[in-house]
Image (cartoon, rainbow, N blue to C red):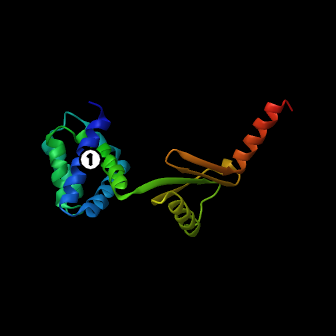
Amino acid sequence: MSIFTVASRYAKSLLELANEQSNLDTVKADIDGVIVALKSNSELQAVLKNPIISGDKKVNILKALFEGKVNPFVISFFQILVSKGRAAIILEIAEEFIREYNEVKGIVKATVTSASPLSADNLNVLGNKISQEIQASVLLTNNVNPNLIGGLIIRVGDRQIDASIAGRLNKLEKHFANQGV
């Protein structure tokens, strides 16, 4: 069974259970923190993936890191994952949980790439415009690519709008190349 399939099943279970207990938003916030902690600590990921380290040690490490900082419900979920031999994919399960949470809540991820960082106000206005256009909540992130020279590239799901100067220059170059100029 693929890691994605396994992660998806556990994430759905966590999502359904958290929803039943009416603490879905709390669990989501906790899982966000877990993802940050796991991504910023490669040693922790290595420990969780190491088959030589016992499950009890892995549970103790997770408790030491997260107990008192996350809902006890999340700690219990980690204990189940470790007991089922799924400690190595806790990060993947957490990321899949966030993806499924966003789907349930109707939140769409969008990315705007610009030549320089956009202000919070500009991001807010752009996020609101995209939200109105697609009729869904938008989680907008800003990537910076100085090679764009100016303008924006907006990506929402599988759709992309390239309004960058570099994009326009590439289109112009292709046009001239096709014309034999």
- Residue 37 location, x and y as percent? 33, 53
Q: Is residue 98 left or right of residue 24?
A: right
Which residue is at a point 76% across and 36% down the rendered structure image? 174
Which residue is at a point 22% across and 53% down the rendered structure image? 16
Quadrant for the N terminus in the image: top left
Comparing 29 with 107, the one in front is 107
Which residue is at a point 18% across and 51% down the rendered structure image? 77
Please determine whether, in this image, residue 21 is positioned above or below residue 6: below
Q: Quadrant of residue 64?
A: bottom left
Comparing 63 with 99, the one in front is 99
- Residue 94 location, x and y as percent? 30, 49
Q: Is residue 94 left or right of residue 67?
A: right
Which residue is at a point 36% across and 52% down the rendered structure image? 103
Q: Identify the residue under disc 1.
A: 11
Please determine whether, in this image, residue 130 is positioned above or below residue 5: below
Asked if one can make out residue 47 in the rendered structure from this viewpoint, the answer is no
- Residue 4 location, x and y as percent? 32, 37
